[in-house]
Image: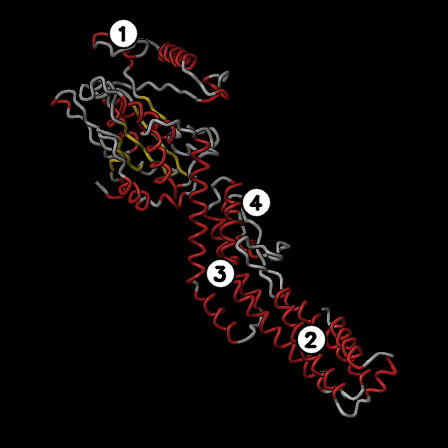
C-alpha cells in the first residue's frame, strides 16, 4: 500500500476521535493547498453489505474487506478515512461502521452519531443497500434476490424515494425548514449495481463507469451540485471535524451555520495573531526599527507600509474562504490593531527626530536676529514658528502607515487575481486613534512638545531683550502706557499667542 493513499481510523469503536492522526493525514495529503476545492464522500449501510469493497473498487482505496470464508462479522469499526486515488478535485472518502450489527446489538447511539457526522461533513453521502431491503423495515431473505434482480430499477427507485419522503414528512424540523420539501434540501440519485459475488466482472465494469461521475464533482452539474458556500477550507478540515464530533458526542444541537461562524472566528483570529508574531520576528522590520532609533529613515512610510501589507495580503489569502464579515472584523480588530501597536514606537521615533530637526532650525534662524530690535525679533519668532510647525505637520503626515484594502472584497478566482494590487496605496490611512489599545496615531503630542520647545526659547530671547541694559524701560512704559512688570507679562502673552498657546 502506497503511503499517499493510506487508510487511517478517524474515530474508533468507542467514539474516540483520532485528532493527531487526522492532523497528520491533512498534512500528508496537502489538503490545506486545496482551499475549498475538494470533496468529501461518505458511505453508510448495513453491516457486511459490501461498503468497503465498493469503495476500494470505486476509489482504489485499501479499506479492509470482510473475509467471506469467515462468515458475516464486523469488519469496519468506527469511522475510517482515505484519499481517493487520482480523483479530481481532491476527494476524501469516509467508510462508516455498518449498522444493524450483532456486535452492538440494541445499542445504536454510535450509529446515529456517525451518521450525523457524515451528513454534516460530506458533500456526497452514499447509502449502500441490498436491493432486497428496499421497501422493507428489516433485511430480506436471499430467495427474494432473483425477484429483485428482475425488477426494473425505476420501480425500485420509486419505492425508495417514497420511503424517503415519508421519513422527511414525519421527522421534526427547524422552524425555518418546517414547510420545506425534501427535494429543497437534498438531491437523491439511485444507482443499481450487479451483485459482487454472482456478477463480479459486470460489477467491476459498472463501478468503473460510476467512478467517472466523481470527477469534477464540485462543479456545476456534478454529484456535489456545484461549489458549496458552507464548505470548510482544507486547512481547517481537521479542527472543524473535531468540533463537530465533540458537539455530536455531547448530544447537543449541531447548528452548522453557528459551527461555521465559530470556525471562522477561531481561525481568523489565530491566523491574525500568527501574522503579528511573524511581524515581530521579521528581519526587514527589525532592521528598520534599529535604524529609526539612530536617526530619521528615508521612505519610512513606504518601507513600513510594505512590510505590513505583506502580512495583510497573507492573511487575506489564508482567510478568503471564511465568513466575510468575521474575517474583515478580525483583520481590523486583531491584525491591524496589533500590528500598529508593534510599529507605533518607530513612528513616534520618526516624529521625535522631526521635532528635534525643526526646533534646531527655528533656533538657528531666530538666534541670528538682532535681539536689540524688538520689532524684528517679534516678526522673526512669528515667521519661523509658523514655518517650523507647518513643516512638522507636513512631514508627519508623510510618516503615516498606509493600510491596503482587503484583497477579498471583490474576490475573483485565485488564478485571475493580481496579488500586487493589495499593495496599492489607498485612502484608508491610519490616523486619529486607529488602535483601540490606546495608541494615538495623530502627531499632536509631539507637535505640542515642539511648540513648548519653541515657546521656551522665544521667552528666553524676550527676557534677554528686556533685561538687557540697552533696553530703556521708560520707552517700554511710554509705548504701552503700563508698568514694567505688567508690560513684560503682556510681551510674554503676545509671544505665547503667536506660537499657539
Looking at the picture, does residue 355 appear above or below residue 54?
below
Q: Which residue appears farthest toward the left when viewing the image?
A: 70
- Which corner quadrant of the image does residue 379 belong to? bottom right
Residue at point 51%, 76% (across, down): 294
Looking at the picture, does residue 33 appear above or below residue 80?
below
Q: Say which residue label 4 marks.
A: 409
Residue at point 44%, 22% (across, down): 186
- Give the structural element (helix, strand or loop) at label 2: helix
Contact (Cβ within 8 Å) of mark 4 with mark 1: no
Query: Which mark sits nearer the N-terminus, 4 or 2?
Result: 4
Query: Within 10 angstroms of label 4, few (less than 14), some, or many (20 or more) residues?
Result: few
Horizontal and vertical percent for residue 397?
64, 64
**For discs 3 and 2, the disc positioned in front in the rendered view:** 2
**For discs 4 and 3, the disc positioned in front in the rendered view:** 3
Query: Within 10 angstroms of label 1, few (less than 14), some, or many (20 or more) residues?
Result: few
Query: Which mark sits nearer the N-terminus, 4 or 1?
Result: 1
- Give the structural element (helix, strand or loop) at label 4: loop
Q: Which residue appears farthest toward the bottom when viewing the image?
A: 470
Contact (Cβ within 8 Å) of mark 2 with mark 1: no
Horizontal and vertical percent for residue 11?
26, 33
Horizontal and vertical percent for residue 289?
49, 69
Distance (Cα) linking label 4 and label 2: 49 Å
Q: Say which residue label 3 marks.
A: 342
Query: Which mark sits nearer the N-terminus, 4 or 3?
Result: 3
Q: Say which residue label 2 marks.
A: 455
Q: Say which residue label 1 marks.
A: 147
- Give the structural element (helix, strand or loop) at label 1: helix
Looking at the picture, does residue 352 appear above or below residue 308?
below
Amino acid at each position: 500500500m502506497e503511503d499517499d493513499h493510506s487508510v487511517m481510523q478517524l474515530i474508533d469503536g468507542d467514539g474516540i476521535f483520532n485528532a493527531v492522526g487526522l492532523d497528520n493525514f491533512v498534512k500528508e495529503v496537502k489538503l490545506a493547498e486545496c482551499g475549498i476545492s475538494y470533496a468529501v464522500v461518505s458511505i453508510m449501510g448495513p453491516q457486511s453489505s459490501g461498503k468497503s469493497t465498493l469503495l476500494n473498487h470505486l476509489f482504489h482505496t485499501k479499506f479492509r474487506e470482510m473475509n467471506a470464508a469467515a462468515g458475516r462479522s464486523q469488519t469496519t469499526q468506527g469511522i475510517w478515512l482515505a484519499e481517493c486515488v487520482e480523483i479530481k478535485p481532491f476527494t476524501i472518502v469516509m467508510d462508516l461502521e455498518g449498522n444493524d450489527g450483532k456486535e452492538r446489538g440494541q445499542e445504536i447511539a454510535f450509529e446515529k452519531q456517525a451518521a450525523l457526522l457524515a451528513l454534516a461533513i460530506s458533500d456526497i453521502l452514499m447509502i449502500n443497500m441490498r436491493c432486497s431491503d428496499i421497501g422493507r423495515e428489516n433485511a430480506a431473505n436471499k430467495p427474494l434476490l432473483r425477484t429483485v434482480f428482475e425488477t426494473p430499477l425505476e420501480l425500485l427507485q420509486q419505492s425508495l424515494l417514497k420511503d424517503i419522503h415519508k421519513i422527511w414528512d414525519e421527522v421534526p424540523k427547524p422552524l425555518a425548514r418546517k414547510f420545506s420539501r425534501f427535494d429543497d434540501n437534498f438531491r437523491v440519485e439511485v444507482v443499481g449495481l450487479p451483485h459482487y459475488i454472482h456478477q463480479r466482472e459486470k460489477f467491476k465494469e459498472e463501478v468503473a463507469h460510476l467512478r467517472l461521475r466523481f470527477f469534477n464533482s464540485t462543479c456545476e452539474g456534478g454529484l456535489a451540485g456545484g461549489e458549496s458556500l458552507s464548505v470548510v477550507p482544507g486547512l481547517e478540515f481537521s479542527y472543524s471535524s473535531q468540533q463537530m464530533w465533540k458537539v455530536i458526542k455531547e448530544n447537543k444541537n449541531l447548528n452548522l451555520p453557528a459551527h461555521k461562524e465559530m470556525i471562522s472566528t477561531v481561525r481568523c483570529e489565530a491566523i491574525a495573531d500568527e501574522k503579528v508574531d511573524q511581524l515581530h520576528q521579521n528581519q526587514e522590520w527589525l532592521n528598520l526599527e534599529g535604524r529609526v532609533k539612530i536617526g530619521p529613515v528615508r521612505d519610512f512610510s513606504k518601507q513600513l507600509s510594505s512590510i505590513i501589507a505583506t502580512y495583510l495580503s497573507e492573511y487575506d489569502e489564508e482567510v478568503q474562504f471564511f465568513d466575510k464579515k468575521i474575517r474583515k472584523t478580525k483583520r481590523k480588530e486583531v491584525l491591524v490593531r496589533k500590528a500598529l501597536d508593534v510599529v507605533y514606537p518607530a513612528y513616534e521615533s520618526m516624529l521625535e527626530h522631526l521635532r528635534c530637526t525643526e526646533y534646531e532650525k527655528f533656533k538657528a534662524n531666530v538666534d541670528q536676529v538682532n535681539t536689540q530690535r524688538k520689532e524684528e525679533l517679534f516678526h522673526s519668532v512669528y515667521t519661523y514658528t509658523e514655518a517650523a510647525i507647518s513643516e512638522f505637520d507636513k512631514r508627519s503626515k508623510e510618516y503615516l502607515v498606509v493600510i491596503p484594502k482587503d484583497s477579498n472584497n471583490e474576490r475573483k478566482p485565485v488564478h485571475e487575481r493580481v496579488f500586487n494590487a493589495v499593495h496599492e496605496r489607498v485612502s484608508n490611512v491610519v490616523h486619529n486613534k486607529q488602535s483601540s489599545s490606546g495608541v494615538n496615531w495623530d502627531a499632536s503630542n509631539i507637535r505640542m512638545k515642539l511648540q513648548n520647545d519653541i515657546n521656551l526659547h522665544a521667552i528666553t530671547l524676550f527676557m534677554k531683550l528686556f533685561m538687557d541694559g540697552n533696553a530703556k524701560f521708560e520707552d517700554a512704559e511710554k509705548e504701552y502706557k503700563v508698568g514694567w512688570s505688567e508690560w513684560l507679562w503682556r510681551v510674554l502673552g503676545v509671544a505665547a499667542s503667536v506660537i499657539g498657546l
